[in-house]
Image: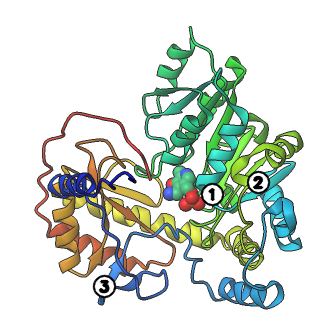
Amino acid sequence: MPAKPRIAELEAALARLRRRHAERRRRVLETPQQPCVRLDGRALLSFCSNDYLGLANHPEVVAALRDGATRWGVGSGAAHLVTGHSAAHAALEEELAGFTGRDRALLFSTGYMANLGVIATLCGRDDTIWQDRLNHASLLDAAVLARGRLRRYPHADAGALARQLADQTATLIATDGVFSMDGDLAPLPELAALAERAGAWLLVDDAHGLGVLGEEGRGTLAHYGLDAERVPLLMGTLGKAFGTCGAFVAGSETLIETLIQRARSYIYTTAMPPALAEATRVSLAIARREGWRRTHLQILIKRLRSGANQLGLPLSDSPTAIQPLIAGSSEQALRWAAELETRGILVTAIRPPTVPAGKARLRICLSAAHTEAMVDRLLEALSELPLEPSPPAPSSTTDSA
Ligand code: PMP
């Protein structure tokens, strides 16, 4: 007789999540990704999207996708190594290599898969993989998939990592460039020096830095003035500042050829639609040339931070589009998000395990598509919140999203 599915156990686990205010809820968006959205039938001003430059809904990008579909059809029809690799993909890869100043770039269907592909290709059982405590979940999962020894160092603390490396080996050091839930920057120059000293790979996941930081939006490395050779493995996503979907890894000829031959999350999956590659070529060009988007975003960041400061709001220290307001408990974060929503403002409450226990927060995301008046509306709504942070709970493991 077949084993009975353990539905009762699943139901009990779901009920526990609900009791702990840890249940995640999907919302139904009825408009394109833009500041003024309709969600579950309500008009709201949104500060939740990673569309940092306001390109997800840009008419030229939309037109490129439409024209791309007319030329290429919708589906790529196969994996890159079968017949899925088109001239559109090849052109985008070349442009991304130029943009990041590297020999080559390789497209992946998502950032999650790019991180799995790089780490599981370069590391195995005998390798030690060092990661920042607050790295994105995909980097952590990649280390598990590689079956290597995963070691974590305190957040953005190159000094602590240096002490740990004094008597331990390292195959690869991986870090977010801009941390996805905190908006702060990794100390890349120090990490690059440590990686060089240890003879380890350095992988920077710049999902939230590319497009936003540095000249032409070249990201966290450009922000620090770090040469490409100092960071041999660069991962970038296309679904955030570039407003489309997918990801890439940029690096040397040998690295990219190795990934093509061995990265399972590259080999065994359908290539992204070529039309999406065409749309991304256009959004990349806009992101590079329209520096006003970054300037405007910085103006909004300053406006939010100085307004929050005047209101005594405990915004975390972040120079990027991600501006977290720490609530403490999940209950408090959910309460604040609900309060804001009654005032027409949408900000997602981020809770453990995405962030450490006791560090639930509102993750406020700014975009070049916002206006200063929109930021003022957000500040007005925030000023009406009952802002007593709840006491922090003990820290635990995290899965940054
Ligand atoms: N890395 C980081 C730092 C991210 O924030 C994300 C997306 N949340 C990813 C990787 C995964 O990218 P994608 O959404 O393209 O899978």
Residue 311 is situated, as x and y percent measured from the top left of the image, at 20, 61
Where is 109 relative to 354, above or below?
below
Cα distance, mark 3 to mark 2?
38 Å
x 83%, y 46%: residue:
256
Q: Secondary structure at mark 2?
A: helix
Query: Which three-letter amino acid code belongs to the residue tagged 2?
Result: Ile
Q: Nearer the viewer, mark 1 or mark 3?
A: 3
Q: Residues within 10 Å of mark 1 (few under 14, many from 20)?
A: many
Q: Secondary structure at mark 3?
A: loop
Where is 298 relative to 74, above or below?
above
Q: Label for residue 210? A: 1
Residue 155 is situated, as x and y percent measured from the top left of the image, at 43, 34
Q: Quadrant of residue 224?
A: top right
In front here: 288 or 109?
A: 109
x 52%, y 68%: residue:
52
* Residue wearing tag 3: 40
Q: Is mark 1 within 8 Å of ligand 1?
A: no
Query: Which three-letter amino acid code belongs to the residue tagged 3?
Result: Asp
* Residue wearing tag 2: 267
Q: Residues within 10 Å of mark 3 (few under 14, many from 20)?
A: few
Residue 266 is situated, as x and y percent measured from the top left of the image, at 73, 54
Q: Quadrant of residue 225?
A: top right
Name the N-terminal-most of marks 3 and 2.
3
